[in-house]
Amino acid sequence: MAPARPILALMVSVVLSLGAGAQDNDETAQRLQDIEASLAEAAASRAALGEEAGAIADELDILRVRLLASEHEIRDLEQSLTTIQETLAALAVEMEEREQELTVRRDEFATVLAALQRLALQPTDMMIAMPGSPTETQRTAMLLASVTRGLEQRMTEIETAVRSLVELRDDMTQQEIERERTLVLIRAKLAIARYTVASKSDLLSRIEQDDAVLAGRQNELSREAADLKDLLLVLWTEAEQQSLAQSEEMAAAMDALAANRFSAQQGRLPLPVTGQIALTFREIVPEGLPSRGIAIESAPGARIITPYDGQLAFAGTFRDYGHLLIIDHGEGYHTVLAGFARVHVTLGQWLLAGEPVGVMPTNEADGRLLYVELRRNGDPINPLPWIAAGTSEVSGG
C-alpha cells in the first residue's frame, strides 16, 4: 500500500533539504567493503598459489638433479659398454691369432711326429744302410724327440691361453649383457623423469599464469577501491556540508511512512521490467564471483518502473554500471537498478510503486538486461522472494 500523497509531499520538502548524501555514502562504503573483501580473497588465493608454485619449483629442482645424475650414469654405462666392446673385439683378434698359431704348431707337431714314427719303424740293418753314420742318425732322432717335446709344451701353453681368453670373453660378454639391461632400465626411468619434469613445468607455468590473472584482478580492484575512497571522501564532505538536525516534521513523515513498511511487502512486489530472469542471486558470473543481484531480460525499449514507494537516493552513471538508480524504501532497504537506455527521474525525487523511471535499450547490441539488487542495511539479499507470484520466470539454459 502506498503512503498518502500529503505525507509524500511533506517528506519531499524535508528530505530534499537534507539531500541524498547519506544514501550515496552508505552504498559507496558498502561497495568499498566488498572490494576490500575481494582484495583479501585475491591475496589469499595468490598466497596459496605461491606456496604451490614454491613446492613444485623445489620438486623440479630435485627432479633436474636426478635427471642430471641419470644422464651421467647413462654416459658412464655407454662408455663402459664401448670399452667392453673394444676389448671383446681385441680378444677376438687375439683368439684368432692364437688359434692360427695353435693350428701351425699342430701341423709342425704332426710332421715331426710322423718323422719319428718313420725312424722308429726302420729295421736296424736299414738304419746302418742309411746315409750318414749311425751316430748322426741317433742325433737326428734325439733332435726330433726334443722338438716334439717343445711343440707339445708350446701347444699346451697356447691351449691354456685360448681357454683363458674364452673365459675372459664369456665374462665380458656377460658384463655387456648386464650393462645393456641396466642401460635400458635407466633410459626408461629417464624418459619417465623427463615426462614428469615437463608436466610439472607445464603445471608451474599454468600456476604462474593464474597468478598473473589474479595480480591483474588485484590491481583492478585496488584502482576501483581508490576511486571509491575518493568518491566516499566527496560524499562525506557533502554530507558534512548538508548535515542538519532532523526536524519534527521529518520524524512525523517517517512515522507515517512506517505504516507502509517495505518489510511487509515480501511476495507482493512487481518486477521492475517485464521479462524473464536471466541471472539469479548468488549465481557465479564470468568474473568468478557470485552475483549480488538478479538480471531480467526484457523486450527492446521496455518500460522500467519502481517496485515500491521510495526516494531516489542516487541517479547517475557509475563505472561499468551505466545509468544507475538507487531507491531508498526506508527501514534500511534499497533497490538498485542498472541497465537503462534513458532515465526519467532526478535525484531526490519521491516515487510511487509502479511509477516509470526509465526505458530499456532498443538496440540489440546494447543488451536488454536490467540488473536489480535489493539491499538491507547495505547487504545484498535475494530479490526473488519479494516478487509477486506469477510475475517472474527464470529463463531456461
Image (cartoon, grey):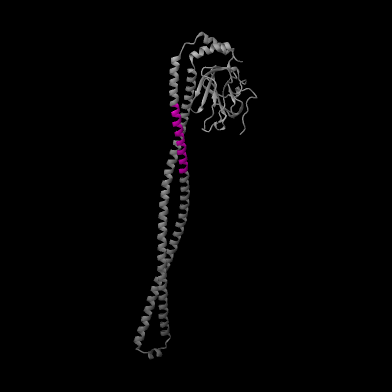
Residue 329 appears in the rendering? no
**Quarter occupied by the N terminus:** top right
Give the magenta-colored segment's residue range.
Answer: 200-225
Which residue occupies the foreground of this view, 205 or 392?
Answer: 392
Q: Is residue 395 shown in magenta?
A: no
Question: Which quadrant would residue 148 be assigned to in this image?
Answer: bottom left
How many marks the image carries: the answer is 0
**Rendering coords of residue 195 (x, y %):** 48, 47
Residue 221 percent across, percent down from the top left = 46, 29
Q: Residue at x 42, y 79 (%)?
A: 110
Please identify the dominant SS of the magenta region: helix
Residue farthest along the top direction in this orientation: 248
- The correct choice, above or below, for 143 with respect to 56 in the image is below
x then y, percent, for residue 379: 52, 22
Quadrant for the C terminus in the image: top right
Does the stretch in magenta take in 218? yes
Q: Residue 100, percent across and down?
A: 41, 73
